[in-house]
Image: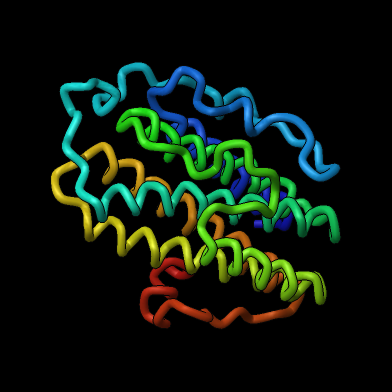
Amino acid sequence: MNTIKKSHLIWVVLLSLSAFLIGCDSSGDLSSTDGTEDGVQYKQDPEAQTVITNWPYCDNNYFGELNDVETDGILFMREEEKMARDVYLTMYNKYTLPIFRNIPKSESAHMAAVKVLINKYELTDPVGDNIIGDFTNTDIQNLYDDLVEKGSVSEIEALKVGALIEETDILDLDTHIAEIDENNDILTIYTNLKRGSTHHLKAFVWNLKFRGVEYTPQLMNLEDYNKIINP
């Protein structure tokens, strides 16, 4: 498969996933994903704004009671997905690589999916009106600052940062999935966020390989990493 076809296939997969993730909130929190951020113009693809009105977990009959761990997980993932989007937009400003223009659209859809849970369970959104690079969670703020500094060294280092972010996301989602008690709506969204992150990880690894760099996982164990990259 040639380079153009591979790139197109990856993006089609991401758009399809984004369309599923928007979920049951008719607004989809999409107002925060269109426009210009730090000079970067981007807009959700119309396909990704599709409202899945028959998604069963939209029904309040599926309303479970959150425990503290689940609540913390939702709030954390909302900001972690924003962190990924913000780093990628910042890297696009610096390098204008297509991957840093395209994947933030999917990350915005991931943010919107978690916002569905925040709205449903009437939690306080930690993102609020925070601009790019501004976070409520100090750990995420520090991680963002560190990743932007590392990614600013070169295009290669920026792509490695992208892969590291997706590794981090996958591992954090695994942790939060294991903590879910009986709330299938949370489980469904997290499972699909993880699927999206695996596609993103593949995309960054492929971009590095295209540039002659063989990526070595920075956080994941090699066996789990290989299952994603070479299923």
Which residue lies at the image location 66% right of the left edge and 72% below the top edge?
146
Residue at the (42%, 40%) spot, across then down: 114
Task: Please identify the quadrant where the N terminus is shown.
Answer: bottom right
Relative to 153, does residue 109 appear above or below in the rendering?
A: above
Residue 202: x %, y % from top left:
55, 62
Name the quarter where the C terminus is drawn: bottom left
Q: In which image quadrant can residue 63 be found?
A: top left
Residue 156: x %, y % from top left: 76, 74
Using the image, determine if residue 173 lies above or below residue 155: above
Image x and y of residue 148, in percent: 72, 67
Query: Seen in the image, is 128 located left or right of residue 58?
Result: right
Instruction: Between residue 114 and residue 21, name the one nearer to us.
Output: 114
Say if 2 sits above or below 47 in the image. below
The residue shown at (24%, 21%) is 59
Residue closer to the observer: 25 or 137: 137
Identify which residue, 99 or 88, lies in the foreground: 88
Left or right: 188 in relation to 157:
left
Q: Position of residue 56 (x, y in %)?
A: 24, 24
Q: Give the residue at x 60% y 68%.
A: 142
The picture quadrant where one finds residue 23 is top left
Nearer to the camera, 116 or 159: 116
Count of numbered marks: 0
User: Which scheme is used to colour this image of the protein?
Assistant: rainbow
